Amino acid sequence: EVQLVESGGGSVQAGGSLRLSCTASGFTLDDSDMVWYRQAPGNECKLVASVSSIGSTYYADSVKGRFTISQDNAKNTVYLQMNSLKPEDTAVYYCAADLGQLTVVAGPCKIDGRWYTYWGQGTQVTVSS
């Protein structure tokens, strides 16, 4: 069974840090591009960061310099280290996997206009001022 399971969310004060984990089962990260995206109440899904199968990374401008995406292929896990958190970072954070455009399916929302292959269930991050 294919699964993406997020963990590590919680409540922190502004300026604090959290590390989110997304553990995959049923497929290997070596073959996929992975993304973290977030959705705040009433808002659309927003891409936060991504890492490709060859290790290229991307960050949204709003998190650049504060968040770091990484992956441990031995643990089949992608991480999102979030530092200097701000109240506007409050959202449910999700991971998703892209194994190629022929494999994508509709998920909870389009992420910057795209569907992905596998979708996680999300972890809540709340940042208080």
Image (cartoon, rainbow, N blue to C red):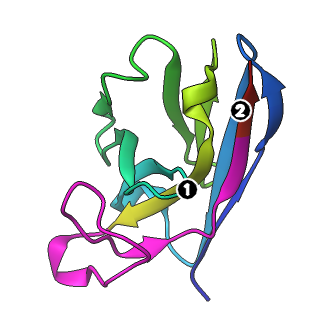
Q: Is residue 73 magenta?
A: no
Local crowd size for mark 1, using a 10 Å CA cut-off: few (<14), some (14–19), many (≥20): few
Q: Secondary structure at mark 1?
A: loop
Closest to the observer, 129 or 10? 129
At 30% from the left and 84% from the top, the residue drawn is 105
The kind of residue tagged 2 is: Arg
Question: Along the polypeptide, which appears first: circle 2 or circle 1?
Answer: 2
Instruction: Please give left or right for residue 93 compared with residue 65 in the image.
Output: right
The percent coordinates of residue 125 (x first, y second) are 70, 42
At 53% from the left and 40% from the top, the residue drawn is 71
The image quadrant of residue 111 is bottom left
Q: Secondary structure at mark 2?
A: strand
In the image, the segment drawn in magenta is: 99-125
The residue that mark 1 highlights is 41
Closest to the observer, 109 or 18? 109
Regarding residue 28, the answer to whether it shows in the image is yes
The residue that mark 2 highlights is 19
The kind of residue tagged 1 is: Pro
**Is 90 above or below relative to 81?**
below
Local crowd size for mark 2, using a 10 Å CA cut-off: few (<14), some (14–19), many (≥20): some
The percent coordinates of residue 9 (x first, y second) are 76, 44
**Is 7 above or below relative to 89?**
below
Closest to the observer, 10 or 78? 10
The image quadrant of residue 85 is top right
The percent coordinates of residue 51 (x first, y second) are 36, 40
Where does the N terminus fall, quadrant-wise? bottom right
Instruction: Please give left or right for residue 42 compared with residue 56 in the image.
Output: right
